[in-house]
Image (spheres, grey):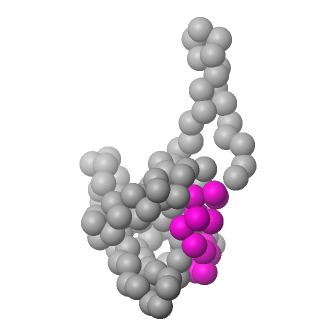
Amino acid sequence: MTDMATTAGENGSSRNWTFLTNHGHVLLAIARNPTTRLRDVADEVGVTERAAQAIVADLEAGGYLRRTRVGRRNEYTINPSGHFRHPAEADQQVGALLALFTGEPIGNSTVNS
C-alpha cells in the first residue's frame, strides 16, 4: 500500500483523505488483477480482510459485481454499466472510471479472487 497525501487541518493536525472511497478502491483492485485474493485486495486498499469482504458484499448487492464460487476460490464478474450512486454522477457508468484507471475498456469481465 502507498502512503496517502495529508492535508493540514485548521488546528495543525493532519488528515488523510483520497478522492475514491474504499469501495472504489476494492472494485479497481479486482478489475486490475483478475487473479487477486481478497486478502491481497485488503492489503492493497489498506483495510482488513473482513472489511474487504463486506465491501465486496456491498458491491454485489448493488449490482456492480457478481460472485460465483469456483472450487476453493471466488470468481467475480464486473458490471461496468452500473451507475454511480451519488446524484451528481448518477448519469455516469462505473466502467468509464475502471477504464480510466486500468487503461483498458472494461466489458462484462470475469475476474477471480
Determine whether 60 is above or below 4 in the image.
Answer: below
Left or right of 63 on screen, residue 68: right
Left or right of 64 on screen, residue 28: right
Nearer to the camera, 112 or 12: 112
Left or right of 19 on screen, residue 56: left
Residue placed farthest to the right in the image? 2
The residue lying at 34 percent from left, 53 percent from top is 89
Which portion, as a residue range, is magenta? 32-44
Q: How many marks?
A: 0
The residue lying at 67 percent from left, 40 percent from top is 4
The residue lying at 47 percent from left, 91 percent from top is 71
Is residue 109 among the parts visible in the rendering?
no
Residue placed farthest to the top in the image? 11
Determine whether 57 is above or below 77 in the image.
Answer: above
Q: Position of residue 57 (x, y in %)?
A: 35, 64
The residue lying at 57 percent from left, 73 percent from top is 37
Is residue 94 found inside the magenta-colored segment of the image?
no
**Quadrant in the rendering for residue 36:** bottom right
Determine whether 101 is above or below 7 in the image.
Answer: below
**Quadrant in the rendering for residue 78:** bottom left
Residue placed farthest to the front in the image? 72
Is residue 43 found inside the magenta-colored segment of the image?
yes
Determine whether 18 is above or below 111 in the image.
Answer: above
Name the dominant secondary structure of the magenta segment.
Answer: helix
Residue placed farthest to the bottom in the image? 71
Nearer to the camera, 113 or 10: 113
Nearer to the camera, 27 or 93: 27
**Quadrant in the rendering for residue 91:** bottom left
Q: Position of residue 113 (x, y in %)?
A: 53, 77
Is residue 49 among the parts visible in the rendering?
yes
